[in-house]
Amino acid sequence: MLQVLRKAEMSLLTAVLKAERSLGMGGRFRPPAPIAVRVTSRPLRSAAVLAVPLAALGGSTFGAFTDGTRFLQAVLLGAGMTLFFALLLRLERLSQLHYERVGYDPAARPFVHRPRTGGPGRTLARLSVRWGVLTVVFWGVERAKGAPVSWLFSGVAMALVLLVIVAISYLAERRRRRSRPPTG
């Protein structure tokens, strides 16, 4: 049984390393931070520290502290999240060990995400996706609380919330640009 788990673990590690190489993130340029090594050295403990508060928050959202069945669902949600996070942390630790064994590539440039500048279509698509996700989450949370909420109300409310968020970020960016000295 242990050999089967080891083979599955190694095949997952191989897939992660291939994905890193195909995304241009392979060949780590420096060792991980000490906190990253510490967190990944005990994956189950670190995953439990992360998943238990999330499960408690999720349980309180759908009333798990008043109903036994829902409490059991919240406990199973926490256990599932713990196992998922532990798997991810274990894979990260294995990739850290792989790069320690192979060696770090100081010539490799660090991966820096640079957002592509796009036209209004890209911005509109991004806002539409965010609006859709916010609408579904708001509707689901309100339904779980027992409040009869329509899709129309959820959509309009989240459009207003998104409008406020975009306006605040626009004003903050405008203020930041004004405070910078002109380059040239």
Image (tube, grey):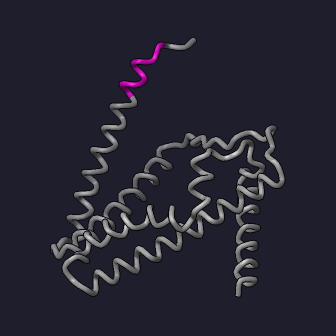
Marks counted in the figure total 0
Viewer-nearest residue: 18 or 12: 12
Q: Residue furthest right?
A: 102
- Looking at the image, residue 41 sits to the left or right of residue 120; the answer is right
- The image quadrant where one finds the N terminus is bottom right
**Magenta-span inclusion, residue 69:** no
> Measured from the top left, where is residue 145 in percent x and y?
20, 73
Is residue 22 at all visible to an observer of this figure? no
- The x, y position of residue 125, in whole percent, is 46, 54
From this viewpoint, is residue 94 visible? yes
**Residue placed at 60% from the left, 40% from the top?**
114
Q: Nearer the viewer, residue 156 or 34?
A: 34
Vertical relation: 35 (above or below) 54: above
Residue at the (79%, 39%) spot, across then down: 106
Q: Which residues are magenta?
A: 174-181
Q: Is residue 56 left or right of residue 179?
A: left
Tell me the residue at 17%/76% (across/down): 146
Return the x and y of residue 115 as percentages of the image width and height: 57, 42
The percent position of residue 50, horizontal first and vertical second, equals 44, 62
Q: Nearer the viewer, residue 169 or 27?
A: 27
Q: Is residue 21 left or right of residue 55?
A: right
Q: Residue furthest left?
A: 147
* Residue found at x 37% / y 65%: 54
Quarter residue 59 falls in: bottom left
Q: Majority secondary structure of the magenta segment?
A: helix
Quarter in which the C terminus is drawn: top right
Asked whether 180 falls inside the magenta stretch, the response is yes
Residue 7 falls left or right of residue 33: right
